[in-house]
Image (cartoon, rainbow, N blue to C red):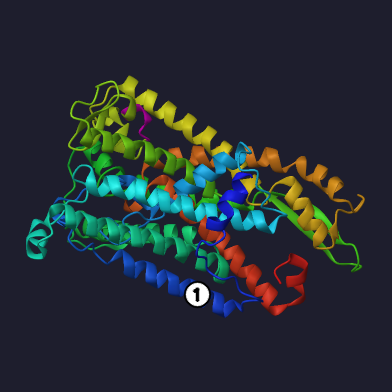
Amino acid sequence: MGWKDAAEPVLARMPAVARPEGHVPFRRKLGWTGGILVLYFFLTNVTLFGLDAATANDLFGQFRSILAGQQGSVLQLGIGPIVTASIVLQLLGGADLLGLDTDNNPRDQVLYQGLQKLLVGVMIVLTGAPMVFAGNFLPADQAVAASLGIGTLGVKGLIFAQIAVGGVLILFMDEIVSKWGVGSGVGLFIIAGVSQQLVGGLFSWQGLGGTSGFFPTWIGIVTGAVELPASPTDLLSTIFLGQGQLLALITTVLIFGIVVYAESVRVEIPLSHARVKGARGRFPVKLIYASVLPMILVRALQANIQFLGRILNNSWAAMPAWLGQYTSGQVTGGLFYYLAPIQSRSDWMWFLGLTSADPLDIAIRVLIDLVFMIVGGAVFAIFWVETTGMGPESTARQIQNSGMQIPGFRRNPQVIEKVMERYIPQVTVIGGALVGLLAVMANMLGTIGAVSGTGLLLTVSITYKLYEEIAEEQLMEMHPMMRNMFGSE
């Protein structure tokens, strides 16, 4: 009796959102997507009952824009458990330890989805419990504990129950969008969080001369409400790195341009329909073939490493200096310091006095971050392509089933697969490494609204793909026969 037979009674009965039986009209898809987005924003504003918000500490810190959710809300965990469970499944699937054929075997597909939900539940516990019960990250409100008469531990139990419910809710919200809406819920939640930060970074009006957004600050500069230093060096520093945020604006615009350009770079393989004469098409192999979603996995892995470090620092009476040194909750030395990614200009611009860290330590951190992101981006991109049915074999089968073929080649899946193998593996590695490099560079230079470079990169790419999906949905809505050709019916 294999593990599949033993686990099937549990995994096959995991709750799931029902798939639509037929074609879902485009307007209904937009309705479901918009409804889930409104629910997401609503839940991020539902504060945790019993939480002492004044002394709470966000464990995710600057990873928050990637992991979505909101500190101190029901969605405290964000998409973290989903992403961490995906990392585990990607690694197990890449090592072929699961023995599941999710492409052709319906039973294995059900087991895979059930296993994913089970792992998400485990990750909710493993991530949420240390936040609540270890350290002072989500402290209990003593007034609530006294009024309810359940003590501090009882209030902490209530807090954990709320964030656990939030973790389950965001799992099913993601599933609703994937099955009934447009795009994926994970991507939608990242776009929502990052866009909110970007809008705030551009337009927030906290008083001219304060830490306002880009446009209010420049209105203050032009009208004289913001005083600028007289020294030319200080003036340039203020305009580009300080209140003026010109470097952040330039970086933001560059990321937008580079990602949109990279999304348009592709190798197009010509296709023709085997039965319909004159019906032709092209299969695009984009430079960022695996999309930027694998980058979420890489950054989430880094976030989990830092999460572990902060938990150990809070629960370990005397943490060894070589492992990690923390000041005011921030890592300042040891192994966890070198593994911490560069998040902003203040992490590395020692020559401008933005940090007192040793230049050699900074160089080591930057090098480790680059290697981690470039290699990790390529590796996870390969795993992503293979586990999501985008590899040469799966793609060849999809083309064959749609009735298409490559002109000049026999209509045979093996032949199509060999053609795809010339492009897909190489483009996947190059694209994954490129996205990793861009993410590090964007983080180092800073962006508008203090959005992490990876968060901005993800938002631009996911939005671009969402636009393409909407255009494809509209095309199939106008021409129903296209649904059969693309296998959407």
Q: Which residue is mark 1?
A: 32
Q: Position of residue 251 (x, y in %)?
A: 42, 46
Residue 482 falls left or right of residue 10: right
Q: Main secondary structure of the magenta part?
A: helix
Structural crowding at the residue carrying mark 1, measured as other residues with C-alpha within 10 Å and reported as few (<14), some (14–19) or many (≥20): some
Instruction: Label 1, secondary structure: give it.
Output: helix
Residue 403 falls left or right of residue 382: right
* Kind of residue at disc 1: Trp
Q: Is residue 311 above or below residue 120?
A: above
Q: Which residue corresponds to the image point at 61% horizontal and 74% vertical from the top-left? A: 20
The span shown in magenta is 337-341
Q: Position of residue 11 (x, y in %)?
A: 54, 56
Residue 322 falls left or right of residue 94: left
Q: Position of residue 480 (x, y in %)?
A: 73, 77
Residue 10 falls left or right of residue 104: left
Closest to the observer, 412 or 280: 412
The quarter in which the N terminus is drawn is top right
Closest to the observer, 97 or 194: 97
